[in-house]
Image (cartoon, grey):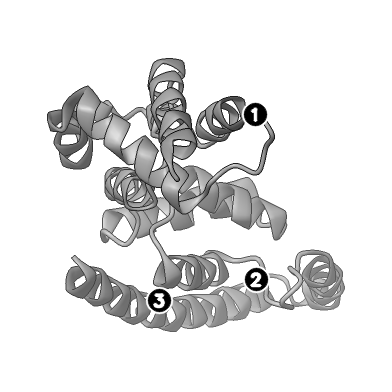
């Protein structure tokens, strides 16, 4: 999966270079046409563009274009899988206009750089690897209009059954024991905060606290 993802990133870099080349040519042609059509408006247009350019720049001092948004997306996904919802939020925080955000994300999805389904798979596997519950991430996945039952990672998790989830919760408590006078209550709260259901949290907290008391 990582090799495929790296290949996709390389493809996006190539696509951005191509877009930038076309954009530069198109912009030159538009500027020339505009000047030929109405040379008297050249100074006025230059003043407006200068003012707009000053106002439409993000903290990294980049123009808020589709090309710039794609570069940001490339930077984000080079580190980890990111959902379209989180990408939109990140680009909004950098003051990119909505039409630019929509076009950039649409293009990134089209070439396979961004995939909500791939993000959901990675999210579930990450939670399981960290021995955390899936309750909060399942809500996030559903908000992306993805059915968790169509995800391989979730089906693999379900195949473990309740005993498997209970083992996960106990592993989490072993790695992150609660610091509380009442061990059972502390363990229960920790598991709930980590995304486990009330049923699993209750069983695991009870079993774990009994094991602590039985130790010599």
Tell us which disc is closer to us: 3 or 1. 1
The numbered dot on residue 130 is: none
Q: CA distance from mark 3 to mark 1?
A: 57 Å
Residue at horizontal 49 percent and vertical 34 percent from the top: 213
Residue 34 in the image, given as x and y percentages of width and height: 64, 72
Neighbours of disc 1 within 10 Å: few (<14), some (14-19), many (20+): few
Tell us which disc is closer to us: 1 or 2. 1
The numbered dot on residue 182 is: 1
Describe the element under mark 3 as helix, strand or loop: helix
The numbered mark, 3 or 2, whose residue comes first in the sequence reads 3
Residue 164 in the image, given as x and y percentages of width and height: 22, 33
Residue 176 in the image, given as x and y percentages of width and height: 51, 49
Neighbours of disc 2 within 10 Å: few (<14), some (14-19), many (20+): few
Residue at horizontal 28 percent and vertical 43 percent from the top: 117
Q: Which residue is mark 2?
A: 37
Q: Quadrant of residue 162?
A: top left
Describe the element under mark 1 as helix, strand or loop: loop
Q: CA distance from mark 1 to mark 2?
A: 80 Å
């Amino acid at each position: 999966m990582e090799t495929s993802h790296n290949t996709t990133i390389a493809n996006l870099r190539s696509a951005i270079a191509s877009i930038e080349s076309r954009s530069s040519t198109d912009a030159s042609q538009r500027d020339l046409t505009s000047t030929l059509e109405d040379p008297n408006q050249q100074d006025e247009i230059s003043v407006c563009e200068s003012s707009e350019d000053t106002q439409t720049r993000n903290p990294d001092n980049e123009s808020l274009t589709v090309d710039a948004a794609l570069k940001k997306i490339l930077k984000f996904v080079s580190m980890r899988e990111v959902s379209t919802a989180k990408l939109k939020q990140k680009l909004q925080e950098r003051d990119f206009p909505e039409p630019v955000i929509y076009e950039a994300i649409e293009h990134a999805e089209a070439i396979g750089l961004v995939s909500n389904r791939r993000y959901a798979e990675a999210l579930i596997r990450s939670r399981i690897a960290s021995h955390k519950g899936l309750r909060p991430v399942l809500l996030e996945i559903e908000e992306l209009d993805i059915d968790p039952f169509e995800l391989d990672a979730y089906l693999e998790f379900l195949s473990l059954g309740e005993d498997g989830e209970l083992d996960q919760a106990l592993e989490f408590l072993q790695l992150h024991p609660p610091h509380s006078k009442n061990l059972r209550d502390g363990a229960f709260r920790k598991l709930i905060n980590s995304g486990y259901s009330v049923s699993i949290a209750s069983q695991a907290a009870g079993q774990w606290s009994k094991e602590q008391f039985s130790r010599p």
